[in-house]
Image (cartoon, helix red, strand yellow):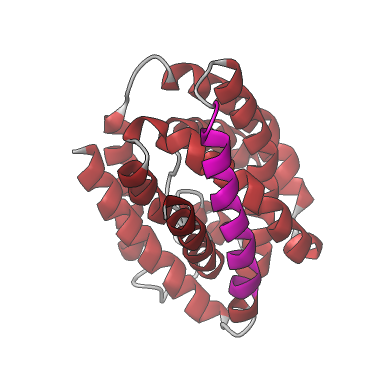
Amino acid sequence: MTYLILFLIGILAYVVSTLSGGGGALIMVPVVGFYLSPSVVAPVVNLGNMIGRPARLILFWKDIDWKIVAYYVPSAIVGALVGGYIFVQLKADWLQVILGLFLISTVFQYRFGKKKRSFPMKLAYFIPLGFLVTLVSTLFGATGPILNPFYLNYGLMKEKMIATKTANSFIAGIAQLSSYTFLGALHGDLWWYGLIIGLGATVGNIFGKRILSRLSDASFRKIVIALMVISGVLMVWKGV
């Protein structure tokens, strides 16, 4: 029963993630925490995400913005290694509160989806973002669609946003899993649980892409903003 539930939640999470530019992992977090243990949420969810990403990479390969990947990935790898070390040493729930408040504010920054951009975004900004976002993701297993405002303000929409985020996350995810494994946070049955989630995520990618192609840019932006606000509220609640 646990395997079936994890498989189904993987499908649901990645359909949502594809339609909203991210945030599907936030659906996985409470389920994994309930059926397994809160202490294994981050490594299991990140493993499931990692297994589900190759299918998404194949589906969206032609839309990847490789310039962003080149700026984002090196610092993201460092963030994954630092985050893995912190994960086994301490908890930093206050980070979730800060990130949650930032996500909630996006509904006002974008004037409820009517505004296309809320602040100027430059390519070089993806360097510090890679480090910070990957560090937080390594600690909690999900950061919500934290990067979405930055991608939107850089001008990426729909398939281009999904594709570029996936490429960045896939490479950073290798460093995350290596960090968890080396430090002993990912072991034994946890690999099987992550595999089941990943298989569900693969199926969810296929369904999500079919639905995404029917959305307009304006509808996509509104869905992204809505999920950012919901994710922000959940992160603040959990952090507090």
Predominant secondary structure in magenta? Answer: helix
The quadrant of the rendering that contains the N terminus is: bottom left
Residue 221 visible within the image: yes
Is 81 colored magenta in this rendering?
A: no
Number of numbered discs overlaid on the protein picture: 0
For this view, does 113 lie left or right of residue 125?
A: left
The one nearer the camera, 112 or 76, is: 76
Residue 220 lies, with reference to residue 197, above or below; the image says: below
Quarter holding residue 136: top left
Quarter holding residue 151: bottom right
Residue 94 lies, with reference to residue 184, above or below; the image says: below
Residue lying farthest to the right in this orientation: 62
Q: Residue at x 81, y 64 (%)?
A: 62
Q: Specify the segment rendered in magenta.
A: 187-209
The percent position of residue 233, horizontal first and vertical second, equals 26, 54
The one nearer the camera, 182 or 223, is: 182
Q: Residue at x 61, y 70 (%)?
A: 158
For this view, does 214 lie left or right of residue 137?
A: right
Residue 156 visible within the image: no
Q: Residue at x 66, y 52 (%)?
A: 53
The percent position of residue 40, horizontal first and vertical second, equals 41, 32
Residue lying farthest to the front in this orientation: 1
The one nearer the camera, 195 or 234, is: 195
Quarter holding residue 140: top left
Q: Residue at x 33, y 35 (%)?
A: 38
The percent position of residue 174, horizontal first and vertical second, equals 67, 33
The percent position of residue 223, horizontal first and vertical second, equals 44, 72
The quadrant of the rendering that contains the C terminus is: top left
For this view, does 58 lie left or right of residue 237?
A: right
